[in-house]
């Protein structure tokens, strides 16, 4: 199907953007900028780029790499500015390896300019930051949107980059990934927390995070609360007394399944960016309004980010009906194809073991076996007892667990990292069952609640200082899963004793329950769930269906980058499967390219710790963004072909990573080409 021209699409954009065509060629003085109806109060702060800035919160390249976070003047009462500074410090470091020998300061980092050159500067970026909630007026959604406009933004060459947060992170979750690239390239950056950002609720004092991170009581926070569960005072008091120290957080407990809206939210962030830019640069009208200067027809917009944010970018591109997005550049996307048939993935001449499974399917499976691989002898023993694992000693059992994960779709390259991802998949399994099923925090699904814990695994309450700084320190999944049904009383899941076995097996009974809700099948007997369990599973599976991707990018240029060693979001279930689904849906009209990187995984933070296994994937996000931007600026500049990039690891962390370790994406990959023939994706070994 012929793709509509950008001018034609812009003509169709409604009053939310007040777009009436391509204003670079045909300014319409009657088009007045209108704030989208879903936006609440917009606040703005301007940063001078010296004492404070958009990218580093005044810390600069050196400050972001400091061994300890900046101190608060009063830890019990941090200011909004201090919370923002520390949130940027924490979030930037969470997605990047900030070790100098891993490439920070030489291949990437604030001091590395848009052309890849190393400068002596601090990397601080002057500009203005705008914040608002997207909501339906109820105050129950309160999705945080943010737009950063650098002073270097060029109205003659306008561009927007999306930075939807990775993981379950708050609004600064993509600051060091898509945000940094956008700011360095003089683009406005449109951020969103996806409705799953930091939103810690504590029962003991009935307190919440407000939009700027400052804590308040639920009553005082009102509609400015990032998240507050729907509870009466009597319900809160009863729960707090029965389960002291327990908490709730937005991603798991909002009862809205925020993932179903991640594409829409990313598009709203782009609309917010257009509104902000037109307020800044439009001509003032007689009644104090502003004319529309920037439209989808004259502004280049790239949807980007990593992990969950990358999946959001793809979903936004699929759901874009207004021509808001021109291209996509995303790394390690958590994306869930709406089918796992109709396409074929092959590696090294053989079909892969499994493809296109849903996130909760494979994460709940991993949550059974990865703790065994990580050294959990009790978990291994309990799995053997239930007939779910083989082996007479720990090593044999761990090897069988690895083999089962490989048969379920993980690559062989991911095997050295399986144990390191045990905690992450545990958190995903507990969080997403609650999110997909839209369960209330008081439902205690499969026996789990959440809380901080002491050294013995007993739930305790957050301190006042921990609550006060939670906006900056928490990653959106807060606390530790507490297994309330543990023999002997509630314990952190990793010390939980299953009632069915009497073994300290990291709460296996609870995770078998979660697995059953994800699949609708009892994982021990293989029988379909019945009764209440079946009803709960139906809720979870309905939520899983709400988040599926169609694979239709509508002919937009797009590059997906993933690490072959990803043990959290296996490439066979996400990136490779999406490429196959896209081929089945778009066929010859597709402009999707797929770059797979050897020795790269989901967490760049492992780079310095595992120098002989891991190289940073982050550098390839910027290269992908460079490639799609060049293609948008000049269609004669072709996107690189799909390919396997073969990297070289270091033997020792003392050896600096250079471009020889992480070679460029090739314009002619030859035998390393990843090919799509019909609906068959072929990846070289």
Image (tube, rainbow, N blue to C red):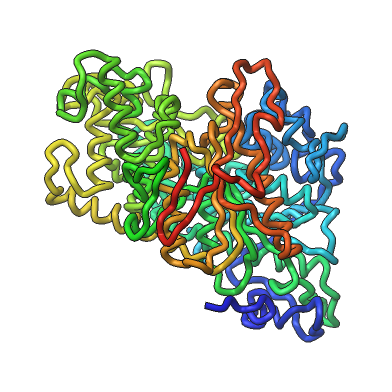
* 39 relative to 559, above or below: below
| Quadrant of res 133 | bottom right
In this image, 487 relative to 257: left or right?
left
How many numbered discs, if any?
A: 0
Q: What residue do we see at 57% from left, 62% from top? A: 591
Report x, y in % for residue 64.
72, 31
The x, y position of residue 606, in whole percent, is: 55, 26
Q: Residue at x 56, y 46 (%)?
A: 643
Residue at 32% x, 21% y: name it: 495
Please, is residue 469 above or below residue 303 in the view? above
Q: Quadrant of residue 490?
A: top left
Res 88 seen here: yes
* Residue sitting at the far top: 393
In-image side of 371 versus 221 (left or right): left
On the image, the x and y values in percent for residue 85 come to 71, 37
Residue 117 in percent (x, y) is at 82, 38
- Evaluate whether residue 13 shows in this view: no
Is 164 left or right of 149, judged from the image as shown?
left
Of all residues, the one furthest to the front in this rendering is 670
**Which residue is more in the foreground, 188 or 438?**
188
Q: Quadrant of residue 656?
A: top right
Q: Is residue 429 left or right of residue 307?
A: left
Residue that appears at 51% across and 43% down: 167
Q: Image height check: is 15 above or below 684?
A: below
């Amino acid at each position: 199907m012929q793709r509509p021209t950008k001018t034609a699409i812009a003509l169709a954009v409604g009053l939310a953007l007040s777009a009436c065509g391509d204003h670079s060629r045909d300014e319409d003085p009657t088009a007045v900028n209108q704030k989208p109806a879903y936006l609440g109060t917009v606040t703005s702060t301007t940063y001078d780029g010296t004492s404070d800035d958009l990218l580093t919160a005044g810390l600069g390249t050196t400050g972001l790499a400091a061994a300890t976070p900046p101190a608060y003047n009063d830890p019990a009462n941090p200011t909004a500015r201090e919370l923002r500074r520390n949130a940027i410090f924490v979030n930037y470091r969470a997605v990047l390896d900030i070790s100098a020998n891993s490439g920070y300061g030489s291949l990437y980092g604030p001091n590395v300019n848009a052309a890849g050159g190393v400068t002596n500067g601090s990397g601080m970026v002057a500009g203005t930051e705008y914040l608002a909630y997207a909501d339906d007026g109820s105050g129950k959604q309160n999705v945080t949107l943010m737009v950063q406009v650098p002073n270097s933004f060029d109205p003659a060459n306008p561009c927007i980059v999306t930075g939807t947060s990775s993981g379950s992170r708050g609004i600064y979750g993509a600051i060091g990934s898509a945000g940094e690239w956008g700011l360095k390239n003089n683009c406005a950056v449109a951020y969103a927390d996806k409705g799953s950002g930091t939103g810690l609720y504590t029962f003991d004092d009935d307190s919440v995070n407000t939009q700027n991170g400052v804590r308040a009581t639920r009553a005082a926070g009102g509609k400015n609360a990032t998240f507050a569960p729907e509870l009466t005072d009597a319900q809160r008091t009863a729960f707090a007394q029965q389960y002291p120290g327990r908490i709730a957080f937005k991603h798991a407990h909002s009862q809205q399944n925020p993932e179903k809206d991640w594409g829409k939210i990313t598009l709203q962030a782009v609309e917010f960016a257009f509104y902000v830019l037109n307020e800044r640069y439009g001509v003032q009208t007689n009644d104090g309004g502003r004319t529309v200067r920037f439209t989808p027809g004259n502004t280049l917009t790239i949807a980007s980010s990593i992990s969950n944010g990358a999946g959001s970018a793809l979903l936004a591109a699929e759901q874009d009906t207004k021509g808001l997005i021109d291209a996509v550049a995303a790394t390690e996307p958590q994306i869930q194809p709406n089918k796992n048939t109709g396409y074929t993935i092959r590696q090294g001449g053989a079909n892969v073991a499994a493809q296109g499974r849903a996130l909760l399917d494979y994460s709940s499976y991993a949550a059974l076996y990865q703790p065994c691989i990580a050294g959990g002898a009790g978990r291994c023993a309990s799995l053997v007892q239930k007939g779910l694992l083989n082996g007479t000693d720990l090593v044999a059992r761990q090897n069988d667990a690895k083999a089962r994960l490989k048969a379920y779709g993980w690559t062989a390259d991911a095997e050295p990292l399986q144990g390191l991802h045990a905690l992450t998949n545990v958190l995903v399994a507990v969080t997403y069952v609650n999110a997909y099923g839209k369960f209330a925090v008081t439902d205690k699904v499969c026996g789990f609640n959440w809380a901080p814990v002491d050294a013995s695994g007993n739930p305790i309450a957050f301190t006042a200082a921990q609550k006060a700084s939670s906006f900056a320190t928490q990653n959106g999944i807060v606390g530790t899963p507490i297994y309330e049904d543990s023999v002997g009383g509630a314990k952190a899941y990793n010390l939980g004793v299953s009632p069915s076995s009497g073994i300290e097996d990291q709460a296996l009974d609870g995770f078998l329950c979660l697995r059953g809700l994800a699949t609708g099948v009892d994982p021990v007997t293989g029988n379909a769930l019945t009764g209440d369990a079946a009803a709960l599973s139906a809720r979870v599976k309905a939520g899983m269906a709400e988040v599926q991707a169609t694979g239709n990018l509508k002919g937009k240029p797009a590059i997906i980058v993933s690490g072959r060693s990803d043990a959290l979001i296996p490439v066979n279930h996400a990136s490779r499967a999406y490429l196959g689904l896209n081929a089945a849906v778009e066929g010859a009209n597709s402009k999707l390219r797929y770059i797979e990187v050897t020795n790269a995984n989901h967490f760049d933070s492992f780079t310095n710790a595992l120098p002989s296994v891991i190289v940073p994937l982050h550098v390839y996000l910027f290269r992908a963004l460079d490639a799609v931007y060049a293609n948008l600026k000049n269609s004669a500049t072709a996107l690189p072909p799909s390919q396997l990039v073969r990297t070289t690891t270091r033997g020792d962390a003392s050896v600096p990573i250079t471009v020889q370790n992480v070679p460029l994406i090739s314009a002619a990959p030859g035998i390393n080409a990843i090919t799509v023939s019909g609906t068959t994706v072929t990846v070289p070994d």
